[in-house]
Image (spheres, rainbow, N blue to C red):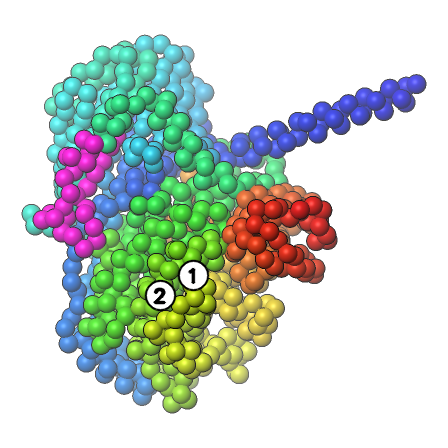
Amino acid sequence: MVKSWLKQLLKYWMLLLCLFVPYIGVQAIEDSNILYSNKPAVNWHEAFPLGNGRMGAMVYGGIFTERVQTNEDTFWAGGPRLLQKEGSLKYVKEVRELIASGRTAEAEKIINSQIVGPYYHSYLPFVDVMMRFLPDMGEVTEYRRELDLSSGVLSVSYKLNGIKYHREYFISYPDQALMMRLTCDRKVLSLDLSLQSKVKHSCSTDNHTVYIEGQAPEVCWPHYEPSSEVIYSDTCGMRFQGRLLVVECDGVVRSNVHSLQIRNASEVVLAFVAATSFNGFDKDPVAEGKDTDKLCAEIEARIMKKDYKDIHTAHVNDFSSLFNRVSLSLGSDERESWPIDERIAHYELEKDPALTALYFQFGRYLLISSSRPGSQPANLQGIWCDDMKAAWSSNYTLNCNVEINYWPVEVANLSECHLPLMQMIKETTKDGRRTAEVLYGSPGWTVHHNLDLWRTTWPVGKSGQWGIYQAAPAWLCSHIWNHYEFTNDKFFLKEYFPVMEGAAEFYLNTLQKTPEGYLVTSPSVSFENLYVKPDGTKGWVCQGPSADMQMIRNLFECILEAEKVLGIKSDIGAELRKSVSLLAPLKISPRTGELQEWYDDWDNLDDSNGQVGHGWGLIASDMITLRKTPELAKAFRRTLDKRKPMYRSNSGSWTGAFAAGWWVRLEEPDSLQKTIDRHFLKALYPNLTSQFHGFFQIDGNLGFTFAIAEMLLQSHSGELHILPALPAKYSEGYVSGLKACGNHEVDIYWSQGLASKVVIYPGTTGKLRVRLGKDEKEYNVVKNEQLVLNGKLEVLSK
């Protein structure tokens, strides 16, 4: 009798568990997507970021003084420039002859003295929203500053002298405004509002608005230049305007010359709207600029017609529609409830698996916040910058950083966030055609190491060691093909096919033939690396470095494949088919067994710099894979053994991103986890952003976002590979909503490190190959008809 009763009770408990576990699981995931701190930020690297693609903000959450530092993605120094140096072609020809004859040191002197141009322009800080609260003293308790990644809403709450205060911040993409709502449980909320900026500006007020107007400088130097001079000009430098609006207030509002005073309120709703005179990358923002007053007035008019609740709802619906496509659980422990700065400061190797999942989702959050259709693409710091002398000008660095920013965008199911990069590539072709003609005497288009807002393509100043980088067009175009592979969007591919053709046309007309009959780039560099020749000569300029040739081969092959997809014939198709077989092949050094970095069998000068970019074909294409090209994979693995990039620098920025990406593609979960651990221990600021040599670099965040996604799912090699590099630390978990090539979405559940269920939502009809461990099977799938597999790849349902 007792046994029967216990059995019945157990049955009811199991039923209740089945009913509530889904809710508990969802609730746990929602809670895990929150960053919080129990104190205000004391510096920029502790503040939490907000963004809508066009506008960004770092919120400090101060109690007595609040600073909300903002950015606007078109607010850059300078204006359009034509940097092409007429007559430069003769120097390129001379340089090529010197390189071919082995006189590389002489070639470098000519490049530095006759070819490279000035620095590119810098991204700038914009406007600070300042709040000074009264009273400015008292006992503070129950403080919490929280960023909900899933909604893009940041909140600050605390008690001051026993009175509850709450603030809410977000930047709306639908309404293009920074919204702030301040509440108090009594009508004692009093504060002064003002605007300030590090650039040249003036402020004024009316009854309910603070205005700021100003001008960007003509020249602002990067951080590594000793000059701190900021140069302004009446004829160069875009104008800007910002407005801080009191949208709702149940207290008293008074204005003085430069600020607004709010007294005795229980609720205040503020909106910050902004505009610059930027009118396109090729338009003078002074002579041809947009009317900033009109633009701000239009945004203000829309805001003032709406209720805060409606603005908030529209924002959350928009942001969460992107963010909530992917859920991830990698396990949990007690540290998941700690403040984010404490989780980072006390990180231990076998603890806090949820931090890795949070880091992945934070990367997705940063992409949504800094790269939306119609905005500029994410730059070196995404959209956030607080320095007049920005780190590396906070521009677009094309020898890896920009591309790494967008490595995760497709697999993380944020394809539309890729579009700003596509638009930038298309815009680059205008000046790129001038550079191709003047510098190389070639049709097509090109670009080198850097870009800025003005899409300038001439080799950047100071040194050809980075400035003469030639592979950028091919690498950028790989993103065009990558976007097509994941979306199957033929309309997009057709639109961008001429961009790819233009890059290929440039290479077809500039590649040089070696004595062995191979086609190579010249002059070029292998990223920024220095080599040592057998005779002891050191240098950087070269012909046909391995990474260049991998990217160009990939470009040629993608164009030929795109011909088939679109059912068209390229004007250069026949030449591409002929030339692709003549491109310099990947080589394995007979001396070392390593994958050669240079066309000739030279050694790199410095193992400690961590740049091993000739593994591009392993991480950014399927040119090097464990199963298709095992010899090449083994040779590159030898290179990694020697140069150990995972231990270089602090594993921030590209130093960690490349290493993590190589380990997932080599399917080495232990090595991947060591790289993640080192990144978490050495490269994280208290707000979870990635630091590199003392500066925020967003490619550190986004490169690891890519690696975490690909440890769970890879689809670059013609198959869906399930859990290819899952570290033991994450033995229990699941992911839903990852995107695979072919426009498929995938959910994966695993236990004790082994997949238990795989759910595939096909985006196309046809054959689909799936790999899981040693098993590999092919299925016929139908678009929108889900395929459910067990841990042995057996079909459970369709």
Amino acid residing under circle 2: Met
Contact flag, marks 2 and 1 (Cβ < 8 Å) = yes
Q: Give the quarter of the figure containing the N terminus.
A: top right
| Circle on res. 110 | none
Dot 2: element: helix
Mark 1 = which residue?
Answer: 481
Q: Which residue is drawn at 31% across and 58% down?
A: 425
Amino acid residing under circle 1: Trp
Q: Residue at x 74, y 26 (%)?
A: 15
Does the magenta portion include 297?
A: yes
**Where is residue 693 drawn, in percent x and y?**
37, 53
Indicate whether 107 appears above or below 485. below
Q: Which residue is drawn at 65% across and 44% down?
A: 749
Horizontally, residue 652 falls left or right of residue 102, namely right
Horizontally, residue 586 falls left or right of residue 698, namely right
**CA–CA distance between discs 2 and 1?**
9 Å
Indicate whether 362 appears above or below 187. below
Nearer to me, 94 or 249 = 249
* Residue occupying the far right of the picture: 1
Indicate whether 344 appears above or below 256. below
Mark 2 = which residue?
Answer: 500
Q: What stretch is highlighted in magenta?
A: 272-298
Q: Which residue is drawn at 32% across and 21% down?
A: 307
**Where is residue 512 drawn, in percent x and y?**
33, 82
Dot 1: element: helix
Nearer to me, 300 or 48 = 300
